[in-house]
Image (cartoon, coloured by chain):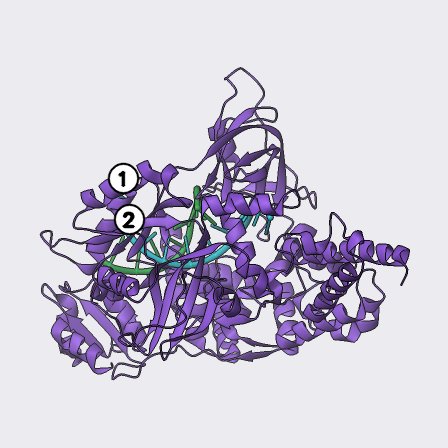
Chain colours: A purple, B cyan, C green
Amino acid sequence: MTEAEAAARLADLAAQIARADRLYHQEDAPELSDAAYDALVRENRELEAAFPQLVRADSPSRRVGSAPAAHLAKVAHKVSMGSLDNAFSAEEVADFLGRVRRFLKLPEAEPVALTAEPKIDGLSCSLRYEGRRLVLAATRGDGQVGENVTSNVATIADIPQALPAEAPDVFEVRGEVYMAKADFTALNERLAGERVFANPRNAAAGSLRQKDATVTASRPLRFLAHGWGETSALPGDTQAEVVAALRDWGFPVSDLFVRCATLDDALAHYARIEARRADLPFDIDGVVYKVDRLDWQRRLGTVGRAPRWGLAHKFPAERAQTTLNAIDTQVGRTGKITPVARLEPVTVGGVVVTNATLHNADEIERLGVRPGDRVLLQRAGDVIPQIVENLTPDEPRAPWSFPTRCPACDSAVAREEGEVDYRCTGGLICPAQRVERLMHFVSRRAFDITGLGAVRVEDFFRDGLIESPADIFRLRDKRDVLLARERLAETSVDNLLAAIEERRTVSLDRFLFALGIRHVGEVTARDLARRYESYAGFVAMIDAALAVREGLAPVLGETERKFELRRARELVAAVATPNIGPEVAEALLDFFAEPHNRAVVDDLAGELTVTDVRHETRASRVSGKTVVFTGSLETMSRDEAKAQAEALGAKVSGSVSAKTDLVVAGPGAGSKLKKAQDLGIETMNETGWQALVADAG
DNA sequence: GTGCCTCGAGTTCC
DNA sequence: CTCGAGGCAC
């Protein structure tokens, strides 16, 4: 190869790799397989080795973080890695403590000790030790599935490769991988000129998630332990004891970690940490509190993605001023019209912000903003940009008015009685809504089809390749049409089709969530799936409920209000699923009553295998039974009792009927206990219930 | 009827 | 992440 040919090839490679990086990171639509990507990177490296004088300023090899994380293997966490709820004021911290007390039903005199430590701005990492040897390191990822960074972590000096003999057989240490401020500055100087990292957090993330661990080794990464995941045994009964054990085993832990006996102590520690913030060798964005007693942590459990026993008390967000250039609107999958602020680009908290949501018309009115105004911006929770205040002095100007026509389909825009949002009335004909629904369908929490990101869904929809979800599963018949498309090579087409085939079998909960029925999100879809277990069972319920709804008519002498109440009650009874009330029941039935939706769902189901969902529970003598709690519970809250019952496979009901199997009665139980006794239903007190739970393990 | 808690839906940047 | 609002306990 001549030098001229090599130079041309290097230019070509730089462009291809940059494009692949951009597609992967920003558009979520990779066109190259991992192997193809690696081949490009390898060829680039070899050419540069042969012609060192030709190394380009924009060479992929000189770019920081050039190996995208896509190329790291995925690992499922045994115990999910959640995030913490945030608080921004002392009041919110007090609220948190109040919630803890209420959940645990603690007497007022009982103190709740908290641990407090700085919240380091790095990236969470889980280190799994088996037989006291480090066997796996993983990033947090989405909390359920992270990336395998074992070989990278092996290069971090702070992280022990082995635990001492007294450590348990299985132990997952969790903590933060970070880069010290001074090391970050030095690294950027060393990388001089080329694409430098914006902040230590990005530097740490970019350095850890390298395919080539020798790159990680050259980066000054550090680690601080603050928790744990799966463990075969725990070296203590409190957070503070376990953290002390982690330190004894050789893990760095924060020297600002303290145990606080009271709320005031914890807040004082927050103030102390905040005062020292600038002098600390690493970036922090707040203080983390945890309930010290581990038995309480276990009882408090987790809700959604965050444990009830922990809280991140964040420092006030950084703010910046900028100009509001325009207010645009966009249409969501439900037709909601959302106003978005287009801003003069400005740096806030280390990133350049150009857009910010304005949520709704009320928010715009509250802020009194119009295009041209100066506004104060912050990144809420250091992530989502938010307009805090309008800085343009009040002067009489025409207020910004909400569009009356949908920006996508020109249908009328309407605001329902008592609702804040304006919605496009175009429904099924609005292309924006159709595309958004398709995007929801393929999104990670729904069908999770890799290679079918926002950009491609939009392209395919526009060109008529995909009009409804079922069309996605018929793309395999259009392989030649796909191949004929620009920028879609054979490998990408086959990768995409393979990804689609992988999802041809789907669990009922994901299936229901993916349909995008109003008010039916992930949790509600799971409730429905657990209740009906199979697709056939679910459809049977829908048909029966639709028949009930058809048959509803006011009876003679019934007032409209009474009729509405009866209608709501009967629909809720027909759907018969926990946490589904009148509003969701109505939305569900509205969806299936629409013939077009029904056709779309039937068509889709015909392409798929929908697998049954069974609620995984521990076997116990209340599995499959209906339990009612009545009276007051003394050692636990109702929520906790309910959670226990559900974990044992029981259904919790609020009232006693012939279908009830067990009534757990505390002091002050009245009519429900009496009714249970009259019906000959088994009853027990709280101690009996605890024994039953303990029996199940 | 009221108030709490949780969920759903929409959003930003890399 | 934030907001509004649905569901349910009190």
Q: Position of residue A338 (x, y in %)?
A: 57, 42
Q: Chain of mark 1?
A: A
**Mark carried by residue A256:** 2
Does residue A168 lie above or below A93 as drawn?
below
Q: Chain of mark 2?
A: A
The disc labelled 2 sits on which kind of residue?
Answer: Leu
Give the structural element (helix, strand or loop) at label 2.
Answer: loop
Residue at image location 25% in from the left, 76% down from the top: A660
Q: Position of residue A555 (x, y in %)?
A: 40, 61
* Residue neighbourhood size for the residue with mark 2, other residues' Cα within 10 Å, grouped as few (<14), some (14–19), many (≥20): few
Q: Nearer the viewer, residue A314 or A535?
A: A314
Residue at image location 17% in from the left, 75% down from the top: A689
Left or right: residue A553 compared with residue A635: right
Quarter holding the N terminus of chain A is bottom right
Q: Nearer the viewer, residue A114 or A99?
A: A114
Tell me where residue A452 sits by quadrant: bottom right
Mark 2 or 1, nearer chain start = 2
Q: Nearer the viewer, residue A509 or A121?
A: A121
* Residue neighbourhood size for the residue with mark 1, other residues' Cα within 10 Å, grouped as few (<14), some (14–19), many (≥20): few
Residue beneath disc 1:
A272
Q: Position of residue A516 (x, y in %)?
A: 56, 61
